[in-house]
Image: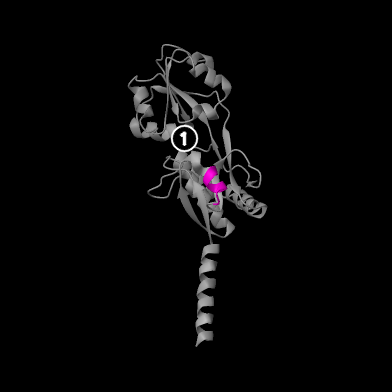
């Protein structure tokens, strides 16, 4: 009887271990349409990561935390992979870039001042995404230091409406996030225009072993060559920009 019980326990333990081994936990950001929609577990970034992990042979489980805590939690031992990284700390292994963010300026077409460079932000009311000064070049930081007003915000859904109502002069945000909220706020409006002064920011995933990073890269390469890659972009961005 004791032998039989041990055998049953061994089988159950093996099954549990196998189930755990078939799932990868990923640290990802919080609500950020069209990239991440927490309630439905959809959005371009989540669906791309799901597809890559599935191609690796695993199911994915997302752990949502603010961007500023992603790396620290991963360094503390949480999860198997961490998303949206630009550096590679010692002892961790970076994948190829899987996503790019393109920050832009948005102004009203009737703005009294023509913006030809970042220095033209001086004296204007500027609203930007949180921590914009950490991600954008030094000449941006220098210019907004002389802005009439400058505010960085976490919630970006109201930003297009504030610009349309003349509460601010300039928005600074990711291209896809802007278009997502602008189409929701004023789908028939054409009074805003986009200005491009920044290079795209490319982000990779960090893994704990080189083998996992290489496996991610192989799966990512296969996804990028598939029809799904363009379908996801058209579905969430209405254009191909990755």
- Prevalent SS, magenta region: helix
Q: Is residue 81 magenta?
A: no
Identify the residue at image location x=35%, y=24%.
162
- Is 87 on the left-hand or right-hand side of 173? right
Q: Position of residue 229 (x, y in %)?
A: 54, 46
The furthest residue to the left:
165
The furthest residue to the bottom:
1
- Check disc 1 and report its element: helix, strand or loop: helix
Query: Could you tell me how many numbered marks the image carries?
Result: 1
Q: Which residues are magenta?
A: 71-77
Q: Is residue 117 visible?
A: no
Q: Position of residue 152 (x, y in %)?
A: 43, 27
Identify the residue at image location x=51%, y=43%.
70
Q: Is residue 132 visible?
A: yes
Q: Which residue is mark 1?
A: 176
Q: Position of residue 88 (x, y in %)?
A: 63, 41
């Amino acid at each position: 009887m004791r032998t039989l019980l041990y055998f049953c326990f061994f089988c159950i333990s093996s099954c549990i271990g196998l189930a755990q081994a078939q799932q990868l936990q990923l640290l990802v950001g919080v609500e950020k349409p069209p990239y991440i929609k927490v309630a439905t577990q959809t959005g371009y970034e989540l669906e791309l990561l799901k597809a890559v992990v599935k191609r690796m042979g695993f199911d994915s489980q997302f752990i949502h935390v603010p961007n500023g805590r992603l790396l620290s939690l991963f360094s503390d031992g949480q999860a198997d992979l961490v998303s949206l990284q630009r550096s590679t700390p010692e002892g961790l292994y970076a994948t190829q870039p899987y996503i790019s963010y393109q920050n832009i300026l948005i102004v009203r077409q009737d703005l009294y001042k023509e913006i030809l460079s970042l220095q033209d932000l001086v004296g204007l009311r500027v609203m930007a995404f949180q921590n914009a000064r950490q991600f954008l070049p030094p000449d941006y930081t220098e210019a907004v230091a002389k802005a009439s007003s400058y505010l960085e915000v976490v919630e970006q859904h109201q930003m297009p409406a504030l610009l349309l109502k003349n509460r601010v002069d300039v928005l600074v945000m990711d291209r896809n996030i802007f278009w997502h909220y602008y189409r929701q706020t004023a789908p028939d409006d054409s009074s805003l225009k986009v200005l491009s002064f920044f290079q795209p920011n490319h982000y990779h995933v960090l893994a704990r072993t080189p083998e996992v990073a290489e496996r991610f890269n192989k799966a990512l390469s296969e996804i990028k060559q598939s029809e799904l890659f363009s379908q996801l972009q058209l579905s969430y961005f209405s254009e191909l920009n990755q």
